[in-house]
Amino acid sequence: MAEMVLMPQKGVSDESAVLAQWLVKEGDTVKKDQPLFTQETGKSSYECESPADGVVLKFFVQEGEEVNVGVPICAIGQPGEKVEAPTAAADAAPAAAEEAPAAAAAPVAAAPAAAATVSADGFKASPRAKMLAEETGVDVKLATPTGPDGRVIERDVKTLLKNGVPEQAAAPVAAAAAPAAPAAAYEDKPLPKIRKVIAENMHKSLSEMAQLTLNRTFDATAIMEYRKLAKASKGMGVEDLTLNDFILYAVSRTLPEFPDLNAHFLGDKMRYFNGVQLGVAVDTPRGLLVPVIANADKMSLVEISKAVKEKAAQCKDGSIPASELTGGSFTVSNLGAAGIESFTPVINPPQTGILGVDTFTLRAKEVNGEIKYYKAMGLSLTFDHRALDGAPAANFLKALAEKLENFSLLLAK
């Protein structure tokens, strides 16, 4: 009996995904675990494998279509075996985020199975194609469609960018003579899936937690001098170390001393982690992602630096596995490069804390009776007051600052 291949769920919050590209054709013989197609979610893209040996009997979903997870997308069986398409065609399209009130507009025809945006002139584009076009500033209508039913899909926008964006054709003379329509006062755009996930998580965080933020600065002289020394070194593999790497390293060595911040608050219990599963906030064109550096407290400074750069690159190109975006025990978010002197980072539940890293400010202190100026860096710790009190949270910041102010000694341990 033929085996139905279902659209897999890669992330716990993913309700649907786009079938970006088939890697096989109908009639092909495939082996178990052979890649069948690529799947795109709001966060990443993945290759999905065949669950069995056999022949690809029939495709139920075409390239560029967005379908709910768990929906049959193809059948694999024996040569010549007959297979019927799923009866509920409507199951192949994700449900609308919300229904418009009946009085808001006249009745329209049912949406096609693919969750593509259709403009008034009949132009169709997949959500991923529109997102990429918006991120790169090109007109999605200039792409040559290769998707089903003349739909522009993401690879078409990539081809457009690769081959160069042509100048738009001039409007017909007759059209130019017509009176110009008044410009719209605004434009409504649907939220990308990843933005919806971020919005839900942030709202849940602020509505369910007792969050409080503590701010302090530390003398950044030591880490600045070490950064200068590392940058000047040749052939030692430390030239690319950054100040953020130093912060992450110091955090990984401080958290074990404060288990309530290296934990999850689960309502009626606390989950304490044996190692530091360090989340690092990464800004991407698709939104904020937080990859996790597993067991960062067991890693060297150079290993942490390499891991952060690798995961950040994967986040930005959409290739990071969903499994590496979950399971963090504590998060660090750095806005110092944007010149932010102090902010209130929002905890990623069920974690109990998040550290915000701020920019430099010039401070003065008395040294041997003289006023000395130094560069200070700000730290903003938001913690869940249900899980710990203000004193241990303040002590965490104090211990972290002391490690950063004596960074060479920290490395010697």
Image (spheres, rainbow, N blue to C red):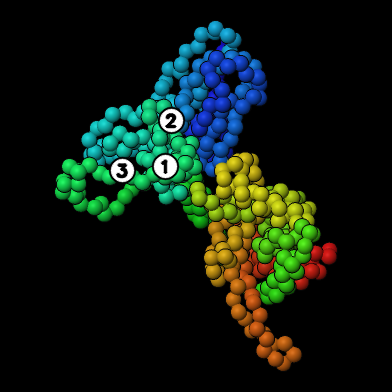
Q: Position of residue 387 (x, y in %)?
A: 63, 57
Q: Is residue 83 above or below residue 247?
A: above
Q: Residue furthest top?
A: 80
Q: Is residue 131 visible?
A: no
| Pick the front one: 17 or 399 | 17
Residue drawn where x is 16% and y is 47% of the image? 177
Identify which amino acid the numbered label 3 is placed on.
Ala
| Pick the front one: 137 or 98 | 137
Q: Spatial distance from mark 3 to mark 2, Cα to Cα?
A: 21 Å
Comes first in the chain, label 3 or label 1: 1
Callout 2 environment at 10 Å: few (<14), some (14 to 19), or many (20+)? some
Q: Residue furthest bottom?
A: 369
Identify which amino acid the numbered label 2 is placed on.
Thr
Give the residue number, with chain letter if any, for mark 1: 130
Callout 3 environment at 10 Å: few (<14), some (14 to 19), or many (20+)? few
Disc number placed over residue 169 in the picture, else none? 3
Q: Position of residue 223 (x, y in %)?
A: 71, 70
Identify which amino acid the numbered label 1 is placed on.
Lys
Q: Nearer the viewer, mark 3 or mark 2?
A: 3
Contact (Cβ within 8 Å) of mark 2 with mark 1: no
Callout 1 environment at 10 Å: few (<14), some (14 to 19), or many (20+)? many
